[in-house]
Amino acid sequence: QVQLVESGGGLVQPGGSLRLSCAASGSIFSVNTLAWYRHTPGKGRELVASMTSTGITNYADAVKGRFTISRDNAKNMVYLQMDRLKSEDTTVYYCTYSRYYKPAEYWGQGTQVTVSS
């Protein structure tokens, strides 16, 4: 079992920044993928960004150049730096974990991000 706890969501004005954090605990495999998903109306849950324990990253086209994923393997932490936020980024963001490069196997409870003036 793996537990994921997100933090860092909140209200920010358009053009502003937020940094999400996620702490993973439990049975963590040395080779794994940590990722951020978000719930998008009409699309369901979509991948925002992912990063493997070996440093391979992947981003959704909608966030490339604005969001940066990073992680601290020693602490089992993953972060999502979100810059130049837009109103359409408003939604709940979820941290996920999977062994190796599999699709998300465990999900956090989510953290709300609201971009509004």
Image: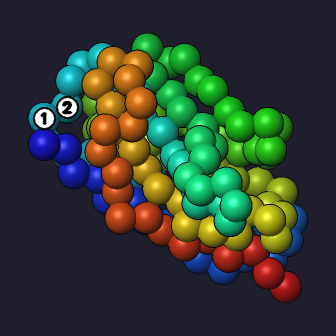
Residue at 39%, 44% (x, y): give it. 96
Residue corresponding to mark 1: 27
Relative to residue 44, is residue 82 drawn left or right?
A: right
Residue at 24%, 19% (x, y): give it. 30
Q: Residue 31: percent from the left, percent from the top?
A: 30, 17
72 versus 90 height, above or below: above
23 versus 15 height, above or below: above
Which mark is drawn over residue 28? 2
> In this view, which residue lies farthest toward the front?
42
Q: Residue 114: percent from the left, percent from the top?
A: 68, 76
Relative to residue 100, is residue 43 drawn left or right?
A: right
Residue type of the residue flagged with mark 2: Ile
Counting other residues with Cα less than 10 Å from the Cα at mark 1, is it few (<14), some (14-19), or many (20 or more)? few
Residue 101, located in which quarter of the rendered image?
A: top left
Q: Residue 110: percent from the left, percent from the top?
A: 43, 64
Residue at 40%, 60% (x, y): give it. 6
100 versus 107 height, above or below: above
Measure how far apart labels 1 and 2 are at the Cα level.
Answer: 4 Å
Residue 109, located in which quarter of the rendered image?
A: bottom left
- Whether residue 9 is visible: no
Relative to residue 15, is residue 54 drawn left or right?
A: left
Element carrying mark 2 = loop
> In this view, which residue lies farthest toward the bottom?
117
- Whether residue 99 is visible: yes
Question: Is mark 1 in CB contact (under 8 Å) with mark 2?
Answer: yes
Residue 73, located in which quarter of the rendered image?
A: top left
